[in-house]
Amino acid sequence: MKLCFATNNAHKLAEIRQMLGSQIEILSLDDIGHNEEIPEDHDTMEANSRQKAEFIKERYQIDCFADDSGLEVDSLDGAPGVYSARYAGPQKNDEDNIDKLLETMRDIEDRGAQFKAVVTLILGTDSHQFEGIIRGEILHERKGTDGFGYDPVFAPDGDTRSFAQFTADEKNEISHRGIAIKKLAEFLQLQK
């Protein structure tokens, strides 16, 4: 089975390919000749994920999936949420986003947060969504050098390490995206 993963994020693409292994051939946007931004202008992850998948399906007539994910901080009323990638501005810079988050939370005691991912799969004319959530807390400073996004400042419940200190396999096993992709993979197994 071939599916296009509708993302321009090389880190996400590598994670997904590792998680799904050889059971599914994952095509990148480059593979199908798409090299521009995909619109995502809704205010929920569910709607953005659906918008991206529908955009690629309509334009290229290829079965595909897309995700939208973000960090939701309890004491910030769920922010940065759907705006996680551009929290510190349209340049979508991970370091700037972390700096803004740490500064915003400098004097906040409640550091509870969650990563959430929503994956939309379009097979033929059918659309399906899969959600993954991992609870944790925002650290007071960066820890680790692996991962991307907010990984250096997010420690999942039950662990003192940040996601940036996990191996890729460890992170994929419990991450929000890992949970959503496992649900996607289980669904795809049933379609064979």
Image (spheres, grey):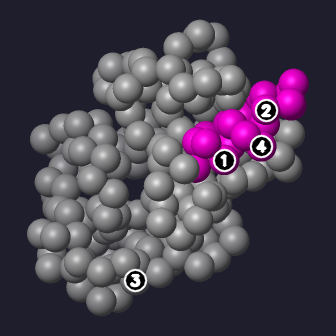
Q: Are marks 4 and 1 in contact (CB under 8 Å)?
A: yes
Where residue 41 sits, quadrant-wise, is bottom right
Amino acid type, callout 1 = Lys
Is residue 42 placed above or below 73 in the rendered structure? below
Q: Is residue 165 magenta?
A: no
Res 189 seen here? no
- Residue at 44% x, 74% y is 52
Q: Secondary structure at mark 2?
A: loop
Callout 4 amino acid: Thr
C-alpha distance separating marks 4 and 3: 35 Å
The residue that disc 2 covers is 106
- Residue bearing the label numbered 1: 100
| Sequence-first tag of 2 and 3 | 3
Q: Nearer the viewer, mark 2 or mark 3?
A: 2
Amino acid type, residue under disc 3 in the picture: Phe
| Residue 52 at least partly seen | yes
Give the Cα distance between marks 1 and 3.
31 Å
Position of 54 with respect to 168 (left or right) is right
Quadrant in the picture for residue 106: top right
Magenta highlight range:
97-115
Residue 104's disc number:
4
Task: Tell me whether circle 2 and circle 3 mark residues in contact (CB < 8 Å).
Answer: no
Give percent across and percent down for residue 114. 67, 37
Q: Which residue is mark 3?
A: 55
State which mark lies toward you, 1 or 3.
1
Q: Secondary structure at mark 1?
A: helix
Indicate the position of residue 17 as horizontal and vertical percent values: 22, 44
- The Cα–Cα distance between marks 4 and 1, rounded to whole angstroms, is 6 Å
Separation of marks 1 and 2 at Cα, in angstroms: 10 Å
Q: Which mark is residue 119?
A: none
| Residue 48 shown left or right of residue 15 in the figure | right
The crowding category of the residue bearing disc 2, from other C-alpha atoms within 10 Å (few below 14, some 14 to 19, many at least 20), is few
